[in-house]
Image (spheres, grey):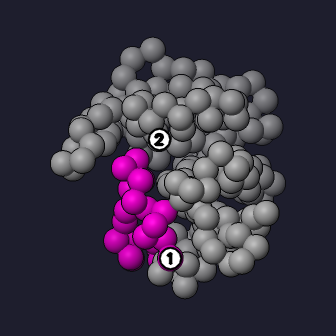
Amino acid sequence: MATIRRFKAMDLFTVNNINLDKYTETYPLGFYLSYMSQWPDLFSAAESAGGRLMGYMMGKVEGKGELWHGHVTALTVAPECRRLGLARGLMRFLEDASEKTYDCYFVDLFVRPSNKVAVRMYETLGYILYRQVIDYYMGNGVMPTEYAYDMRRALPRDVGGKSVVPLKHPVGIEETFF
């Protein structure tokens, strides 16, 4: 059994085993701390009954007007804890806050197309491929340079679903800033 709770500063000492996945971005310490201070209710952890960190999600809200949305910055689960529904639970946590606390129009995320397991999971959660972002992920010696899927899921505030009408052409990374 796992509990989803707010991420704590002390959790930063236990994320190494989770961040070893080749698809997981590892950020400088200050980046994690900035999310903890700016969006503490959108930075969550999945914890075992014994207190072990099993996964985490960093999220934020951004945009203006009809582009006001929740964003998944990072979602990762320790390899030995996968297939337990933790990622789905963490996603629900962020979606609920984006809808009920921040009154967002949609939730979005970026994912490598080569991460087929994650893409399938997001699709089962109702996310659609909104656009492709050219050269979003830079090669690092382990993973190649790769474009990103920008996937979105409309929230109830977007009554007409305007935020999830897919673009027909790829965009550059400079077109992804809100």
Relative horizontal placement of residue 125, taking residue 75 as reference (left or right) = right
Is the residue 62 above or below the residue 121 in the image? below
Q: From the viewer's perspective, is the residue at label 2 or at label 1 nearer?
A: 1
Query: Mark 1 falls on what kind of element?
Result: helix
Please, which residue is most extreme toward the top here?
A: 168
In the image: residue 164, left or right of residue 25:
right
For the magenta stretch, what is the residue range?
14-34
Residue 68, above or below 61: above
Residue 175 in the image, given as x and y percentages of width and height: 37, 37
Q: Residue at x 60, y 80 (%)?
A: 8
Amino acid of disc 2: Phe
Position in image of residue 163 (x %, y %) = 62, 30
One can see residue 76 in this view: no
x then y, percent, for residue 50: 71, 77
Mark 2 / mark 1, whichever is N-terminal = 1
Report the amino acid beneath label 1.
Answer: Thr
Residue at point 77%, 52% (across, down): 96
Q: How many labels does the image show?
A: 2
The disc placed on residue 108 is: none
Q: Is residue 2 magenta?
A: no
Q: Residue at x 56, y 50 (%)?
A: 71
Quadrant that contains the N terminus: bottom right
Counting other residues with Cα less than 10 Å from the Cα at mark 1, is it few (<14), some (14-19), or many (20 or more)?
few
Q: Is residue 120 visible?
A: yes
In the displayed structure image, the side of residue 131 where residue 146 appears, left or right: left
- Residue at 57%, 41% in the rendered image: 108
Name the quadrant containing residue 119: top right
Residue designated by label 1: 14
**In front of the other: 78 or 76:** 78
Residue 30 at what x, y percent from top left?
39, 76
User: Would residue 21 be counted in the magenta stretch?
Assistant: yes
Labelled disc at residue 110: 2
